[in-house]
């Protein structure tokens, strides 16, 4: 049986719950027409605006692209960006049944403006962020927790994707942690600089900058092991860009995983979401942490060669693993 068939068979049998901050990643592209008379700036003639799933929504889209079922839990605003994000999730085969639309809530949105002269490659010139201006009111927060618990009951693994937009509250995390522990399924946390608030998860996928904020020396295995013990994690997968990944498990030898593919990334936007998606799916399939990390390493190496917020398919993943046979992942 081909590696692609094995991965597709294993992945398609799994369901992953992704709970967290759903973000609309928008790309506004245009051609530079001329210099404005009003100010020393270029005038951009608008060509198109595309909306793609970002943050937790991107993690969910990557899981769906790998062939697994995904339960996305979060909130969006009752606004145009929320509507566009729902459409993008539908195109990515991610159901929006457990996503709440909250009146008065502003859908987190990152607008990347891409500009170029005609026939040239578009480059990002500025990013404009729109963020929620208030916390979720109690009725919506309660419903969010109920939806998260419901998703955990049907999942083979759970991901908390925290981008500091207010979804992954301590109360929600406690409820999710309890539900995951009761079913003995992996709980993986991907948090932007709030990792210390998620003690008791199975594993986490911080980048080097994030662990540097938590320990004196982010490259020290003993300090990372101590961090694992303090946060009661079974493992910690540290992503280090061109330096690959480091898998740390208290009481076991740390494993360095070299980066695969080209070291000259095209675009790192959303790469962490892709890594978390593949890693959590590997754990759901019964891989140990090291093999799940190697799977995620290949997924990350593929997605950074694509422009914009992107996903990796099981076919692409299988081809990358097959090309790296000496370190192939046993599936």
Image (tube, rainbow, N blue to C red):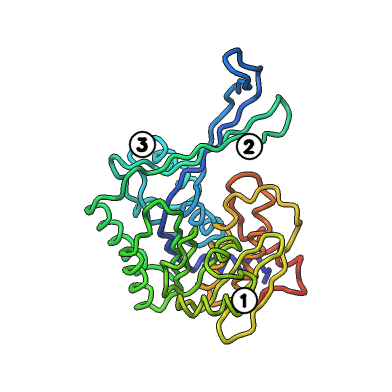
Q: Residue furthest bottom?
A: 251
State the image quarter where residue 215 is shown: bottom right
The residue closer to the viewer here, 261 or 63, is 261
Residue under the image location 62 percent in, 64 percent down: 239
Q: Which residue is mark 2?
A: 124
The residue closer to the viewer here, 66 or 24, is 24
At mark 1, the secondary structure is helix
User: What's the distance in space between the residues labelled 1 and 3, CA to CA?
Assistant: 42 Å
Residue 223 x/y as whole percent: 58, 77
At mark 2, the secondary structure is strand
Mark 1 or 3, nearer chain start: 3
Mark 1 or 2, nearer chain start: 2
Q: Name above or below for residue 185 compared with residue 138.
A: below
Q: Which residue is mark 1?
A: 290
The number of callouts visible is: 3
Residue 139 x/y as whole percent: 22, 53
Q: Which residue is mark 3?
A: 79
Q: Nearer the viewer, mark 2 or mark 3?
A: 2
Q: Nearer the viewer, mark 1 or mark 2?
A: 2
Q: Is residue 164 left or right of residue 217?
A: left
């Amino acid at each position: 049986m081909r590696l692609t068939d094995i991965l597709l068979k294993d992945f398609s049998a799994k369901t992953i719950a992704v709970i967290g901050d759903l973000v609309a990643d928008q790309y506004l592209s245009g051609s530079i027409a001329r210099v404005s008379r009003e100010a020393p700036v270029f005038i951009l003639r608008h060509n198109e605006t595309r909306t793609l799933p970002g943050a937790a929504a991107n993690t969910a889209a990557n899981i769906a692209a790998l062939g697994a079922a995904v339960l996305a839990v979060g909130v969006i605003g009752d606004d145009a960006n929320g509507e566009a994000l729902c459409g993008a999730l539908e195109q990515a085969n991610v159901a929006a049944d457990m996503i709440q639309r909250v009146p008065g809530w502003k859908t987190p949105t990152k607008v990347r403006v891409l500009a170029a002269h005609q026939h040239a490659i578009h480059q990002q010139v500025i990013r404009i962020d729109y963020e929620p201006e208030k916390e979720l009111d109690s009725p919506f927060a309660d419903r969010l927790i109920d939806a998260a618990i419901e998703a955990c009951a049907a999942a083979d693994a759970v991901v908390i994707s925290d981008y500091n937009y207010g979804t992954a509250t301590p109360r929600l995390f406690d409820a999710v942690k309890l539900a995951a522990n009761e079913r003995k399924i992996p709980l993986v946390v991907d948090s932007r600089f709030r990792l210390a608030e998620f003690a008791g998860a199975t594993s986490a996928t911080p980048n080097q900058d994030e662990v540097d904020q938590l320990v004196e020396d982010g490259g020290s295995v003993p300090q990372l092991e101590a961090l694992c013990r303090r946060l009661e994690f079974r493992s910690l997968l540290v992503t280090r860009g061109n330096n690959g990944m480091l898998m740390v498990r208290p009481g076991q030898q740390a494993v360095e995983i070299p980066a695969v593919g080209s070291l000259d990334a095209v675009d790192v936007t959303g790469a962490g979401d892709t890594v978390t998606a593949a890693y959590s799916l590997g754990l759901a399939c019964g891989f140990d942490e090291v093999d799940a990390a190697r799977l995620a390493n290949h997924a990350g190496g593929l997605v950074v060669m694509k422009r914009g917020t992107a996903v990796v398919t099981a076919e692409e993943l299988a081809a990358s693993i097959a090309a790296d046979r000496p370190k192939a992942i046993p599936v």
